[in-house]
């Protein structure tokens, strides 16, 4: 699990030499961090889902005034081609966020979405307990990822981002 979180952090941030942490905090089981080799702060959460064959789920969120980046790792996926662009409707337990959002395959178990910054997306995420990706023409790979305490984690992410050096 820690290896998956590290991999996700590397995918979100700039590629660098190892997991050197400049600042880190916890909100429940979320980790909020600004690694020295990254430009922006990351909020990440990983867990095993006993209701899904004890599979690993990881989500990493980062943002700037220009973009929101989400990385989702799910060890139940077996994507084919790195760089392939997938489309998925993105929603929460009570709101649709985006239709046909573009997600890039990073490896066989990882996708990354880069979206233009929109405060309403952050607001919807902060109220959510679950995030869903409903892939176009592919119900087998559609998932729901648990994001409890997302509002607190995103508030800590905002604080980290406003105070990064």
Image (tube, helix red, strand yellow):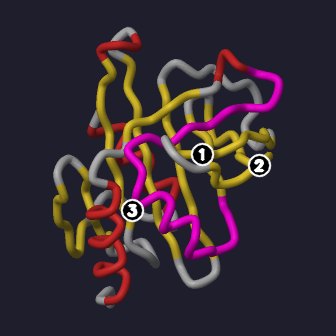
Dividing the picture into quadrants, the one containing residue 26 is bottom left
Residue 133, percent across and down?
A: 62, 37
**Residue at image point 62% right, 74% down:** 118
Mark 2 and mark 3: Cα distance apart in space: 36 Å
Tell me, yes or no, whether the highlighted magenta stretch contains residue 126.
Answer: yes
Of the residues under marks 2 and 3, which one precedes in the sequence? 3
Mark 1 and mark 2: Cα distance apart in space: 9 Å
Query: Closest to the observer: 128 or 6?
Result: 128
Q: Badge 3 local density, few (<14 within 10 Å), some, or many (20+)?
A: few
Mark 1 and mark 3: Cα distance apart in space: 35 Å
Tell me, yes or no, whether the highlighted magenta stretch contains residue 12.
Answer: no
Of the residues under marks 1 and 2, which one precedes in the sequence? 1
Badge number at residue 150:
none
**Residue at image point 39% right, 62% down:** 17
Q: Are marks 2 and 3 in contact (CB under 8 Å)?
A: no
**Residue at image point 64% right, 45% down:** 90
**Residue at image point 36% right, 66% down:** 154
Q: Which residue is mark 1?
A: 91
Segment tinted magenta in the rendering: 114-138
Of the residues under marks 1 and 3, which one precedes in the sequence? 3
Q: Secondary structure at mark 3?
A: loop
Residue 31, percent across and down?
A: 25, 56
Dividing the picture into quadrants, the one containing residue 47 is top left
Badge number at residue 17:
3
Name the mark nearer the viewer: 1 or 3.
1
Q: Secondary structure at mark 2?
A: strand
Name the mark nearer the viewer: 2 or 3.
2
Name the residue at the front extreme: 94
Residue 98, percent across and down?
A: 70, 53
Q: Which residue is mark 2?
A: 99
């Amino acid at each position: 699990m820690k290896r998956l979180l590290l991999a996700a952090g590397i995918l979100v941030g700039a590629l660098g030499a190892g997991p050197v942490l400049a600042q880190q905090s916890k909100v429940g089981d979320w980790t909020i961090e600004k690694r020295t080799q990254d430009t922006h702060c990351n909020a990440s959460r990983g867990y095993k889902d006993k209701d899904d064959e004890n599979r690993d789920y990881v989500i990493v969120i980062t943002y700037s005034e220009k973009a929101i980046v989400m990385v989702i790792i799910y060890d139940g996926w077996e994507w084919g081609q790195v760089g392939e662009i997938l489309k998925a409707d993105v929603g929460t337990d009570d709101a649709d966020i985006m239709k046909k959002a573009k997600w890039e395959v990073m490896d066989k178990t990882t996708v990354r979405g880069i979206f233009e910054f929109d405060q309403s997306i952050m607001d919807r995420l902060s109220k959510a307990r679950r995030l869903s990706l409903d892939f176009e023409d592919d119900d087998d790979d559609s998932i729901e990822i648990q994001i409890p305490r997302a509002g607190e984690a995103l508030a800590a992410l905002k604080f980290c981002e406003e105070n990064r050096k």
